[in-house]
Image (spheres, coloured by chain):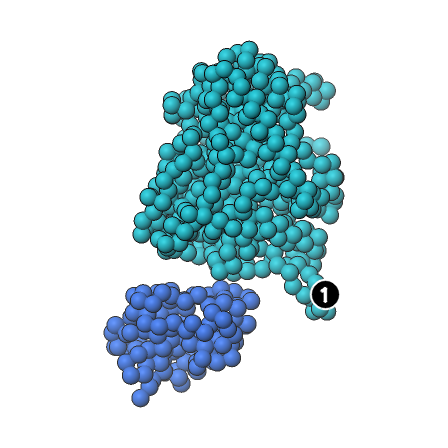
Amino acid sequence: MSTTKFTKDHEWIRVENGVATVGITDHAQNQLGDIVFVELPEIGKDVAKGDDAAVVESVKAASEVYAPVAGKVTEVNEALADDPSLVNTDPTGGGWFLKLEIADPSQLDGLMDEAAYASYVEESE
Amino acid sequence: MRYLPHTDDDRRSMLAAIGVKSIDDLYRDVPDAARIDGPIYDLPLHAGEMEVERDLAALAAKNVAAGSVPSFLGAGAYRHHVPATVDHLIQRGEFLTAYTPYQPEVSQGTLQALFEFQTQVALLTGMDVANASMYDGATACAEAVMMANRVTKRGKAVLAGGLHPHYRDVTRNLSHYTGFQLDEGAPNPDGGEDLEARLDDHTSCVVVQNPDVFGHVRDLSGLAQACRDKGALLVVVVTEAVSLGLIESPGAMGADIVVGEGQAIGNTLNFGGPHVGLFATRDKLVRQMPGRVCGQTTDADGRRGFVLTLSTREQHIRREKATSNICTNSGLCALAFTIHMALLGEQGFRGLAELNHAAACRTADALAAIDGVEVLTDAFFNEITVRLPRPAAEVVSDLAARGVLAGVPASRLWPERDDLADLLIVASTETNTGDDVAALAAALEEVL
């Protein structure tokens, strides 16, 4: 069973079998334009909810990617080093950023589900 | 034409707006001891243009200019011949502006020159990539340490004792205000310094100058390996860029970052500044590099063009997370460097370096033959350190009175070190003729 949740900063987090995968949304990659570089955290790093977890650079801007919930980084997407455009082509699949071992699963409850995020994006436009 | 746009009424209303009575009130925080009461010496309030010109010429004539007498000054700033072509080209209207223009639509010439500058610096230092230049060698050195801290996520830099003290001071300033540690070595005029022993698991980088401030040239490949083994970076500092024409490049010896002073190529002494800082590194570290980078690209019609690139490292985009607060470069000095290098070509540059080394060998031989003078530098490029039988600052002063600029006394760089007081740092370049060396030797024999 998996659930995907969304943040107001346009990250997604998907929990499968106790492991959370984090990336940026299709809306976010669309706003950023061509992604040219992704800076990923060190494995083993502890992040608090809202901490800088990664940096995504497009031809237009460099933006922070924040941790949707607190946890320890267990894996990063090495494929992005060679092909950062995966974030553009497959933002919620092959373009994932990092995996987290979640410290407090109840923090997920405060995030938006897919429908809530869709209307949030619509309102903000 | 009036050069002061404000009327007395303007001033009164501005002072009233900020709540002070007079302009002098704005300076009340300056301690009394630091103030001059009354006029500045005997400076008149105003004078005619011809009188001013005459007075200033008389004032300037009190200086002994490096170009007017046999000069062996160095220690970080070197007098070389700058061909007239360099000055002519950099003063063309397309190049000479108050601010370096980076807009690709209007600045293809400037951008191409910067791209070529970067290529030359990368080739000279033996590195993959160089930036469009820094303010000077000392700030480039401090930036290299901060870059190494970011790359290694460590906070302690080991500085060699042979690093120019001005470079150490600038790095020290930044360490004080941004909170990283420095392990500073003591100067050793005989060369030789066990830097490997000072490496530990907290070391972000070792900063070593080659040739060092006393002129010693060292093979750094062992140190580079030791740094790699400890996960630290090797930062190599070059204060005399012409040395890169003869000495194995820092890149070939294993450096991770090479910084330096480019003044020696295409630029005059410029009173100690403006100079041009060099900064080069490995491809894999380029995103942590400070400064502007110019890149080659193609326009919409597929034609070659030049633009600034990798700007997301920089302050105007990354704000407080930028790699550095430098958002500019030493454009005109870098241009002079580029033009002179292009005029010399690879063979010419090597030839220039050989002339420098030959001049230094002549000087070393002449000084070694003088009773009481000991040459301390065995492997050198164009600069040596000698021990004199009495304080070097006095000797320099005596020789200046005889029309010879003998070099830089070590006491200028380390005023606190009495044990270095008798040392003189002597640079020789292609501008030093055999007559210059004879004049130096003769004057020294007279005063020692």
What is the quadrant of the N terminus of chain B in the image? Answer: top right
Q: Which residue is mark 1?
A: B303
Q: Where residue B245 appears, x then y in whole percent?
A: 60, 42
- Secondary structure beneath label 1: loop
Q: Residue at x 65, y 52 (%)?
A: B116
Q: Residue at x 49, y 60 (%)?
A: B284
Amino acid type at circle 1 is Arg
State whether residue B159 appears in this view: yes
Q: How many marks?
A: 1
From this view, report whether residue A40 is shown above or below residue B273.
below
Residue drawn at x 64%, y 60% is B296
Q: Nearer the viewer, residue B1 or B177?
A: B177
Work out whether residue A47 or residue B356 is closer to the camera in this orientation and state it: B356
Find residue B84 and report its image quarter. top right
From the rendered image, report the letter of the chain displayed in cyan.
B
Chain A tint in image: blue
